[in-house]
Image (cartoon, rainbow, N blue to C red):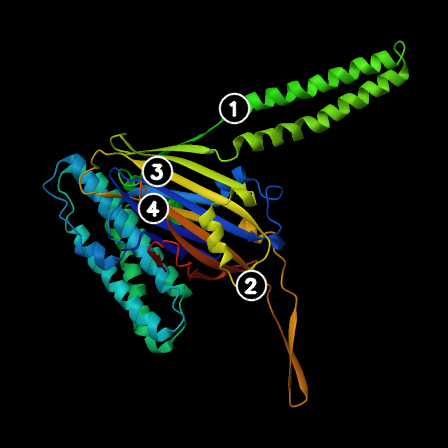
């Protein structure tokens, strides 16, 4: 079984996902080797700003229903339970259903051949119809339970319709498969009538405003995530230490400034214009160098320390499920671990260019207490947005010329860059395991992600790549 899954999520983002059980202690490291020609370093990319804007994570209870057939095979009756159990299992199924159709639809949209696309779309349409029908068969009769069911039913109906329409809109055009297109559109119309005519889930004003219906569905999605997606409490570390460094830097600068002022007063007799100008220059240099000294001291003291801590809680019971520490920093060459450096030495000679290394690390300690009923693992998904990297890249303006029968033609070529990415996984006291990837990208998208072979002396871990 793969320990880590890697996939291209959007045009310029990479997603890593892995699962952990009760009592697990895991450290997951990512080393981004960025070519110097990309002009990315601590001066052009602020680590803290990138963490908050470019790294998006989601931690939730995990079940293997990642595709619609698996969701269907794991479907359990929602009736004959307590109210809390009903909400728990309802949210579990609704969440799995939403993730499953999103996963399958996204994979389907990557198919460009109509002969592959339309049969798969037909299967997706059938599975959605069957699951919705089976889900509605379990509608509770008790009034106090109905509101929870209706929220989930409203959202799943709308979300399935949106995913099917989006998939059909982005699919290849084919007159030969018009009956499948008509079938999908008929299901979407049927779901729309079910929500708006039969059940009247949404008011007229909400239906007529795209913003209102979208925001309402976002709210309903948060409701079905209750008890499944873990609540995160993020806290920056070293705030007190940073204040101490600021005070120390200010004190050191003022010590030097005071010494210069005494010397200036002794050099000039009385209060003269020259003395005032000299004092102005001294205070000016104080303001210039105070921030630089503080930042330099803070980088030295902070080096190697975690930047954030995170507590993961169950949204229903508020019990602590896991605790995490997070690092993000640019590394000096001497700070790169020996095995990671050894992996990078085995690159092809033409790929051995100067690089800047951005290091991300997350250390997780999962509670030893059992999870909520129905769960045995939690899943962490971390999405790295490479748009801030692409922002510094050059646009390709070169042309390649060809000659044929005395005629010369040319075609434009794009400028591509290659990032090396080394992943390190360490479970408890077990030896660390490694993987290396090559990410080829341009300014607008990731071209491909390929796994590279490791040296024989390095222990690899199992990767599943989509």
Percent position of residue 32, x then y: 50, 50
Judged from this view, the residue extending furthest toward the left is 80
Q: Classify the position of the N terminus by image quarter.
A: bottom left
Check disc 4: other Cα within 10 Å, few if <14, some if 14-19, many if 20+: few
Secondary structure at badge 2 equals helix
Mark 3 and 2 residues: CB-CB less than 8 Å, in contact? no
Where does label 1 land, which residue?
241
Mark 2 and 4 residues: CB-CB less than 8 Å, in contact? no
- Identify the residue at image location x=37%, y=62%: 167
Query: Where 29 falls versus 256 (above or below)?
Result: below
Q: Is residue 161 visible?
A: no
Check disc 2: other Cα within 10 Å, few if <14, some if 14-19, many if 20+: few
Q: Earlier in the sequence, mark 2 or mark 1?
A: 1
Mark 4 and 1 residues: CB-CB less than 8 Å, in contact? no
Percent position of residue 94, x then y: 25, 47
Of circles 2 and 1, the one toward us is: 2
Secondary structure at badge 4 equals loop
Horizontal placement of 404 versus 72: left or right?
A: right
Q: Which mark is residue 349?
A: 2
**Distance between mark 2 and mark 4 Cα atoms:** 29 Å
Where does label 4 land, which residue?
431
Horizontal placement of 85 versus 458: left or right?
A: left
Judged from this view, the residue extending furthest toward the top is 270
Judged from this view, the residue extending furthest toward the front is 457
Of circles 4 and 1, the one toward us is: 4
Check disc 1: other Cα within 10 Å, few if <14, some if 14-19, many if 20+: few
Secondary structure at badge 1 equals helix
Of circles 3 and 2, the one toward us is: 2
Where does label 3 land, which residue?
364
């Amino acid at each position: 079984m793969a320990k880590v899954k890697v996939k291209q999520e959007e045009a310029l983002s990479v997603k890593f996902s892995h699962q952990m059980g009760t009592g697990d202690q895991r450290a997951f490291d990512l080393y981004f080797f960025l070519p110097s020609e990309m002009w990315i370093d601590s001066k052009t990319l602020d680590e803290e700003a990138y963490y908050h804007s470019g790294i998006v994570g989601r931690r939730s209870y995990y079940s293997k229903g990642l595709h619609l057939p698996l969701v269907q095979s794991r479907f359990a009756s929602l009736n004959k339970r307590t109210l809390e159990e009903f909400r728990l299992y309802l949210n579990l199924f609704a969440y799995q259903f939403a993730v499953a159709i999103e996963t399958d639809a996204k994979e389907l949209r990557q198919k460009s051949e109509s002969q592959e696309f339309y049969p798969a779309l037909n299967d997706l349409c059938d599975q959605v119809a069957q699951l919705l029908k089976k889900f509605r068969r379990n509608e509770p009769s008790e009034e106090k339970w109905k509101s929870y069911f209706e929220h989930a039913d409203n959202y799943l109906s709308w979300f399935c319709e949106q995913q099917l329409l989006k998939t059909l809109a982005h699919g290849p055009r084919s007159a030969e498969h018009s009956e499948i297109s008509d079938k999908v559109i008929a299901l979407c119309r049927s779901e729309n009538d079910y929500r708006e005519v039969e059940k009247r889930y949404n008011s007229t004003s909400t239906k007529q405003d795209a913003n209102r219906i979208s925001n309402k569905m976002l709210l309903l999605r948060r409701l079905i995530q209750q008890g499944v997606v873990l609540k995160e409490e993020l806290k920056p570390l070293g705030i007190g230490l940073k204040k101490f460094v600021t005070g120390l830097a200010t004190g050191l600068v003022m010590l030097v400034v005071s010494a210069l002022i005494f010397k200036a007063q002794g050099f000039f007799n009385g209060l003269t214009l020259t003395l005032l100008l000299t004092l102005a220059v001294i205070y000016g240099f104080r303001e210039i160098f105070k921030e630089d000294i503080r930042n330099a001291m803070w980088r030295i003291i902070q080096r190697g320390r975690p930047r954030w801590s995170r507590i993961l809680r169950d949204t229903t019971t508020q019990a602590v499920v896991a605790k995490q520490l997070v690092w993000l920093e640019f590394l000096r060459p001497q700070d790169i671990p020996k095995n990671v450096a050894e992996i990078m030495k085995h690159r092809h000679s033409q790929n051995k260019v100067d690089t800047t290394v951005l290091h991300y690390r997350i250390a997780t300690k999962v509670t030893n207490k059992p999870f909520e009923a129905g769960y045995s693992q939690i899943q962490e998904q971390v999405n790295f947005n490479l748009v801030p990297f692409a922002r510094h890249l050059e646009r390709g303006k070169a042309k390649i010329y060809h000659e044929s029968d005395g005629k010369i033609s040319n075609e434009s070529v794009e400028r591509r860059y290659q990032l090396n990415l080394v992943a390190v996984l360490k479970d408890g006291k077990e030896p660390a395991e490694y993987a290396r990837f090559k990410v080829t990208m341009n300014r607008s998208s990731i071209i491909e992600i390929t796994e590279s072979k490791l040296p024989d002396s390095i222990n690899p871990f199992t990767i599943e790549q989509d």
